[in-house]
Image: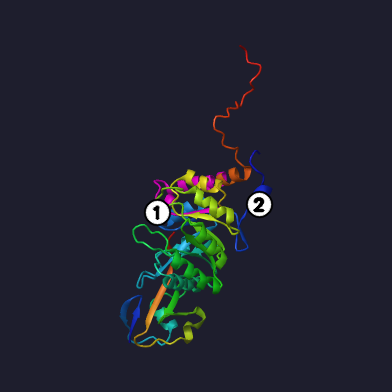
Amino acid sequence: MNVSINGARRHFDPPPATIADLVRELKLEGKRIAVEKNGAIVPKSRYAETEVADGDRLEIVGAVGGG
Amino acid sequence: MNAPDDRTALSESLVIAGRAYRSRLLVGTGKYRDFAQTREAIVASGADIVTVAIRRTNIGQDPTAPSLLDALPPSEFTYLPNSAGCYTADDAVRTLRLARELLDGHRLAKLEVLGDKDSLYPDVRQTLKAAETLVAEGFELMVYTSDDPIVARELEQIGCVAIMPLASLIGSGMGILNPWNLRLILDQAKVPVLVDAGVGTASDAAIAMELGCAGVLMNTAIAQAADPVRMARAMKLAVEAGRDAFLAGRMPRKFYAASPSSPTSGLIS
């Protein structure tokens, strides 16, 4: 499965079924992040039930230093 | 004790969107050498509210690497996520929606929409547009803008909880270039007005407070000082001194109305 994460194409085999699987695969579990799938925010409470499909565009953001 | 007592200090909280904060100095968290210095400087500044930026997570980074959130736990500080680096209303709205999700529904945010990559001057049309959308979605917006009093009034009418005009360009350290415009904004505003951007050193912060600003937001002036921790402390003291001077009510400026401070009678000659 190929998905775009933060503008870069990534291949997954086996494919993650849900956002929760993907977050675990990326070792971001428990980190303070926010996820957007195809332009819509996926609330944390819905990671486990939100499916990931081939071609999805994902944005994963965090808080960094800034003014 | 010859300082104002605690009663004065307590009644003197900065109130934004119904919540009280002890410090009138708000600080950014960017441009420091490392997270240890970030923390040390911010603790020295006494700030309660710290701004953070929202950026793409570095995928594949060591998951145990320290993060800003470890250095400045959200339990200890009030996070003010910003839309820094956004050049359109749509990007700013998208960024602050992600920030709200990231911070578990936190509604306080700093809206900033820039219009020029060289000067970082705010784009007020895009700022007004983004403010309308975000306020309607329940955001409590502290809004970075130009020092135009008409724009400031419109942003307040939209429902922003604080107006934050620039003193001079972001990162310039040029100080308060147009105190008269700030006065116009301060005279009409019913929400807190904070100077955001342009402060270079402690006297700039003090002048902003003496003008009657509710607070000052800065980042570069502290982070890029040769000794950021000492400058953070200087800014804390300057903001406090400027606020006290404003409340005390300064003497009128008198041109040549010479009035000596010592008695004019009883001189020995």
Residue A5: image quadrant is bottom left
- Residue A16's spot in the image, x, y percent? 39, 85
B173 horizontally vs B250: left or right: left
Residue flagged by tag 1: what amino acid is it? Gly
Q: Position of residue B117 (x, y in %)?
A: 34, 61
| Type of amino acid at the residue the image marks with label 2 | Leu
Q: Quadrant of the C terminus of chain B?
A: top right
Q: Could you tell me residue B147's position as x and y percent? A: 48, 55
Q: Residue at x 63, y 63 (%)?
A: B18
Tell me the element at label 1.
loop
Q: Is residue B261 left or right of residue B28?
A: right
Q: Which subunit holds the residue at mark 2?
A: B
User: Is the Cβ of the residue at disc 1 closer than 8 Å to that at disc 2?
Assistant: no
Going by the image, does B251 lie left or right of A31?
Answer: right
The magenta segment: B214-241
Q: Which mark is residue B171?
A: 1
* Viewer-nearest of discs 1 and 2: 1
Residue at which label 2 appears = B10
Q: Residue reaching furthest right? A: B7
| Residue at 56% across, 44% down | B241
In what quadrant of the picture does the N terminus of chain B appear?
top right
Q: Main secondary structure of the magenta part?
A: helix
> Badge 2 local density, few (<14 within 10 Å), some, or many (20+)?
few
Q: Regarding mark 2 in the picture, which secondary structure is present there? A: helix
Please tell me the numbered disc located at residue A19. none
Please report the residue visible at 38 percent of the width from the left and 88 percent of the height from the top.
A53
